[in-house]
Amino acid sequence: MLSPPGENLNFTSLCNSALLNYYCQEGYFHHVRAAADEALGRVGSDPVFLFYRAYGALRTENKVCFGTPGLSLIKTFSDRDAILELDAKMKEQRKTAGQQALYFAGLFLWHLGREDKAREYVDRMIKISGGGKEGLILKAWLDLTCGKETHIKKAVKYFDEALQEGHDVFALLGKAQYFEVRQNYSGALETVNQIIANFPNFVPAFIKKMKLQLALQDWEQAVETAHRLLQKDALNLEAIRMEALHYLCREGNISELILQHTQTLVEKASDLASDNAEFATELGYQMILQGKEKEALKWYKTAMTLDETSVSALTGIIRCQLMQGQLEDAEQQLEFLNEIQQSIGKSGELSFLRAVLAMKKRKRQEEVIALLNDVLDTHFSSLHGFPLGVEYFEKLNPDFLLEIIREYLNFCPAQPASPGQSASPLLKHCASVLETVVKTVPGLQQAVFLIAKVKYLSGDIEAAHSNLHYCLERNPSYADAHLLMAQVYLAQNNTKLCSQSLELCLSYNFEVREHPVYHLIKAQTQKKMGELSEAIKTLQMAKNLPGMRKPTASSKTKGKRIEIDASDRVSVFLELVEAHRLNGEPHEAAIILQDAINEFSGTPEELRVVIANADLAIAQGDVEQALTMLRNITPEQPYFVQAKEKMADVYLQYRKDKKLYAGCYRELVEKLPSAHTFLLLGDAYMNIQEPDEAIEVYEQTLKKNPKDPALASKIGKALIKTHNYSKAISYYEAALRSGQQNFLCYDLAELLMKLKQYEKAEKVLQQALDHDPGRNVINLQQNIQFLLLFVFSARELQARVLKRAQIEQLDAIPAQKQLAAEICAEIAKHSTAQRNYEKAIKFYKEALVHCETDNKAMLELARLYLAQDDTDACQHQCSLLLKNDQDNEAATMVYNYATLSQLIDLLRRAGKLEEVPRFLLMAEKHSSRTKLEPGFHYCKGLYLWYTGEPNDALRHFNKARKDSDWGQNAVYNMIEICLNPDNETVGGEHFLSGNSNSTEKQESVQLAVRTAENLLKELKPQTIQGHIQLRIMENYCLMATKQKSSVERALNTFTEIVVAEKDHIPALLGMATAYMILKQTPRARNQLKRISKMSWNPIDAEEFEKSWLLLADIYIQSAKYDMAGELLKRCLRHNRSCCKAYEYMGYIMEKEQAYKDAALNYEMAWKYGNQMNPTIGYKLAFNYLKGKRYVDAIDVCHKVLEAHPNYPKIRKEILDKARASLRT
C-alpha cells in the first residue's frame, strides 16, 4: 500500500504537484506531460507523476503509455471489453481504497469537471485520515470552483486549517484564488507574495502576481513581473502575452503588420483544424479589421458550412451584407436572429447591426439613437464582474466601441458649438464612452483622436487641442489628427498655425490632396485671411475631386473609390456658396446652391442645404422667404433643432422680436422635449436678458437631471445676472452640500472674489483642495484651476498692495514688487506647461516690470523665445541678462548649476559663448567650495566642450561623473566626446583628415570606443526613453568601429526603434549615419530628408543640427550648394555658435571663388572653435591669402603653428607666400 499523500513528498514534490494541478486547471495538458516527465527524470518511477503523465497524454491524444499497474484502468477508448472489465474491477477496489487512492480519484474527477463525484471521494478520504491536510485543501478547491456561494464561503476556512500545519503552495494558491473570486485583489496579491517568498521557483505564482497587478491597474508592476517571469522562462506565453497587451493598450495602436501576423497564426490554426468553424469565423473578423469585406464574407460562409448553428458566423455575414449594401438580405437574417435571441442571449453586436440597418434605411433619428443606446447598455453590462485582464479587454472590444461612437457622430452637428451654446447631449454621451476607452487603453490613438473631435464639436477647443497634441506627440504622421488640428487652429483664428498643420498633414500623407476636407479647411483659412478668390479656386478643386458626386447606377470607377462622408461633401458646396456670396457674386452662389439641392435631394443632408438657402435669402434681404423655408422643416426631420435656432436668430437679429425669438425655443421644447432643448430655452432667455425665466427653465431641467453640475452652474450664473448675489451664494453652497461636483467651488470662489470677500473665497478653494487631493486626472485638473484662481486672486491683491505701499509704506515697495514678480512667474510657469507660450511670455514680461533684475525670469523668457524659433528675441534677452550688475544679489541665480547649465546652452545658441567665463568666475568667487561642486564641473565641462577643448571638457565631466544629479548627463557627454572628439560630421565625406586610416589613428579610435563602452556600463536609466537613449549610444559605439558587421547590427537596432516609434529623430539620424558609413548615400539622404521636414524642438536640438549638417554634406558632394546653404542657415538660426555650419559655408564660398565671403565664414568658425582647430585655421589663412589680407593670414599661421608646430603645409604654402607678398 502506498503511503498517504504528503508523507513522502519533499519541498520540491509539493511544488511539482501544485504545478501539475495548476496546469490541469488551466487546460495546459502538454505542459502536464512535460512537467510530469521532468519530475520522473528527477525522482524515478513515482506513481503520482506517472498518473499525471498518463492523464496529460489522455487529454492531449486520447491514449496513454502504460507504466504502472495502478493506472491500467486507463487504456484505449476503442477496447470496449477491456473498459467494461476494468470498470467492474474499479468498483470492487473503490470499497477498499486507501487515502491516496481516494485522494487521486477525487483529484482526477475534479480535473474532469465531475465535482459531485469528486466531493464523495474527498469526504471519504478526510474521514479516513481524520482531517488530513491534503484532503482539506482539495475540498477547499472543490468548494471554490463549484460556483455555489454557500460552498465558496467555506473554502477559505479549509485553506486556513491546512495552512496551520505549515506553508503549502497548493493551499496558498487556492487562498489567493478565493480572494480573487471575492474581487479582493490586494488580499490575493499578498497571498501570492507569500508563495513567492516560500517557493521562489514556483512559476505560476509569478503568473498569478502579474495578473493581479493588472487587475489592480498597476501596469508598471505587471510588466516588471512579466520581465522577471521571462528571466525564469524565456518562452513563458503568459508573460509574452502581458508584454504584447501592454504594448497594444499603453504604447500604440494595432498596426497592419500586427494584423498580418495574427492572420497568419489563425490561418495556421485553421490549416491544422480545417473543420473548426470558430477558426474560420475568426479569419472573417481578421479580414473585416483589414477592410477586406469580400474575403471576410467568404470565410464567414465557410464557417456556416462547417457549423450551421454558428451565430457569430451568421452575425459576420450580416455585417458584410450591410457593408456591401445588401439591406434586404441583412434584414431577413437579423429578423431570424431576433426571433431566437431568447435562446442565444442578448448581444450588443446584433443590436448594433440593427442600428446600422435602421440608419441605412433612413429610419427616424430617435429610433436609431435608441438602438445605439441599447447597444452600449448591453455591451457594458457584459463587463460587470470582470477584473482588468485579457478576458476584460476581449469583452471591452475597444474597436467595436469606436464603431458605435462613429455612428453616434453621424447625428451630431458637423460644426463646433458656438461660445455659450449648449453642446448636443449626444456629444456628452460620446465623450463619456471614449473617456472610459482611453482610461483603459490610452495607447489607442483613434480613441484619443475621437475624443478630440468630440471636444472640438462641443466647442471645448482647448481640450481638443490638448488631445490632438497627445496624438501627434506619439504619432507625428497621423494625417487625420493634423487635419483636425488645422480646424482647431482655425477656430482659434490662428491661420498661420492652421496652414502649418495642413502642410504637415500633406507631407506625411500626400493622398490627403484627394480628400475634400483638406481643401475645405484650406479654403476656410484663405477666407479668414480675406483671400476669397483663392478660396473659391480651392473649393472648386475640391468639388471636382473623385467621390464628391454621388455614384449613379451606370458610373464605374477604376481603382479604389475614396469614401467621403455626405456631411463633408455638402460642407464643400455650402462653403463655396458662402465664398461666392462674400466675394459679391450672388449669381454664382445661387448656381452652386442649386447644384447642392439637386445633389443632396432626398438625403438627410438636404436640410443643411435648405438652411444654407435661407442664409442666402437673408443675405439678399429676403427675410420672409428665409423664414418660409425654415418653417417647412418638421420635427420628424433631422436638423429641425438647427432650423429653429436659425429662425430664432432671424427673429432677434432682423425683426428685433424677442418674443418670437423665445417662441422658437419654446416650440422646440414642446415638439422635442429633452434636457437639451430645455437647456437651449434657458440659454435663449439668458441671451435676451430674462434671467428669471431662465432660472425657472433651468430648475425644471435640473429636476430631470439632478446630478448635472453644468445646470447648477448655469442657475448660479443666472442668479448673478439678476444681481441676486446673496441668493447665488446660498444656491452654490446648497448645491455643494448636496454633493454637486467640485467645479461649483470654482464658480462660488470666483463670485466671492468679485464681491471682494477674499477670505471666504480662499476658504472655499482650500476646502475643495482638501476634499479631494487629486486621485484622478479630472480632479487634478480641477485642483489646478483652483490653484490658478488662488494665484490670479493673489495677483489682483498684490496689485492693490503695491498701490497702497506707494502711498503708505515706501520702504516695503521692493519686497512687494519681488512678491508680485514671483506671482507672475508662477502664472507664466503654468502657461508654459500648458504650451500657451504667448501667455507665458506676457506674464514673464510682467514679472520683469515688477523686478527688472529677475535673472530667472529673463532666462525663462529667453528659453521661450528659443522654443518659438525667435532667436533674435532670445539673443536680446541674453544680452539684457548679461548687462545685469554682477554684484547684484539677484545674480546669485548662477550658483544654481541647473540654471547655469541652461544659460550656457542659451548663450551658445545666441552666439555669445564669450560671456560664459564671466559667469563661471562669479560662481568661483561666490564660495570656496565651488571648485568641489559636481554641478560646477559639469557646467565648466559643457563650456569647454562647446569651445573645442574636448580633453579639458572630459576632465571636468569626469569630476561630475559619480554624482547622483549630474552623473548620467556627464557620462553621456563623455561618451560623445570619446566617439567624436573633433566634432566631425559623422558619416560625412568632406573635411575627412588625410590620415584617417593610419594605424595610429585606428588605434586611437579603438581606445576611444573601449573607453566609451566602459562608460556605457555606468549608465542606469530609470525610464523607457532612458533605455532607448542607452541603446542608441551603444549602437553609436558599434558604428564608431567602422566594421561592416558592427555597423549593420547598429542599423538593425535603429530600424527597430523607428518601427516602434516612427519619427524618433535620434534613431533616424543613427540610420542615416549607418547608411553613410556603408556607402548607401541615397538611403541616408531619404532618412535625413524626413528629419528636415519635421518641426524643430529643443529636446532633439542636437540631433536636428547633426542631421542638417550631414544632409548639407551630401548636397555639397553633389554640388547642390543652394540646398546645402539653406540647411546651414537653418543650423545657424538655431545655433549661432555652430562652428561646423560656418566651416561648410566657408567651403561653399571658396568653391565659388568668393574668397572674401569664404574668409568671413571661416572667421566665425575659427572664433566659435576658440581658435583651437588647426584645419579651420589653415583654411582661414588660405582665404586671407587669396583675398590679399596678408597680415591677417600671417597672424593666423602663427597661432596655428604655436599650438601645432608640425602642422603640415601651412608654413610653406601660406606663411612664406604671405610674407613674400608683403615684401613685394
Image (tube, grey):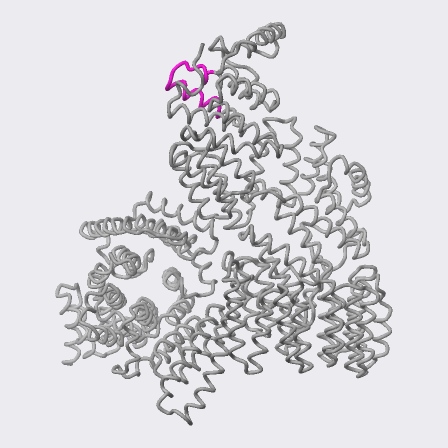
Please give the name of the residue rendered at 49% of the width and 74% of the height, measured from the top-left corner.
790
Q: Is residue 1198 visible in the rendered structure shown here?
A: yes
Query: Going by the image, does 1222 lie left or right of 1108?
Result: left
The residue nearer to you, when weighing 969 against 533, is 969
The answer to which image quadrant residue 637 occupies is bottom right
Query: Going by the image, does 1075 lie left or right of 218?
Result: left
Q: Is residue 784 magenta?
A: no
The residue nearer to you, when weighing 663 against 476, is 663
x, y (%) of residue 1094? 47, 62
Please give the name of the residue rendered at 79% of the width and 81% of the height, measured from the top-left corner.
658
- Is 164 above or below relative to 703? above
- Which residue appears farthest toward the front when viewing the image? 130
User: In the rendered image, which quarter contains the N terminus?
Assistant: top left
The residue nearer to you, when weighing 710 against 1130, is 710
Query: Going by the image, does 756 lie left or right of 799?
Result: right
Please give the name of the residue rendered at 64% of the width and 41% of the height, measured from the top-left corner.
287
The answer to which image quadrant residue 647 occupies is bottom right
x, y (%) of residue 195? 42, 35
x, y (%) of residue 777? 53, 60
- Is 476 above or below relative to 1219? above
Query: Going by the image, does 397 lie left or right of 1176?
Result: right
Which region shows up in magenta?
31-50
Q: Is residue 506 visible in the rendered structure shown here?
A: no
Q: Main secondary structure of the magenta part?
A: helix
User: In the rendered image, which quarter contains the C terminus?
Assistant: bottom left
The residue nearer to you, when weighing 952 against 84, is 84
Q: Is residue 47 magenta?
A: yes
The answer to which image quadrant residue 486 occupies is bottom right
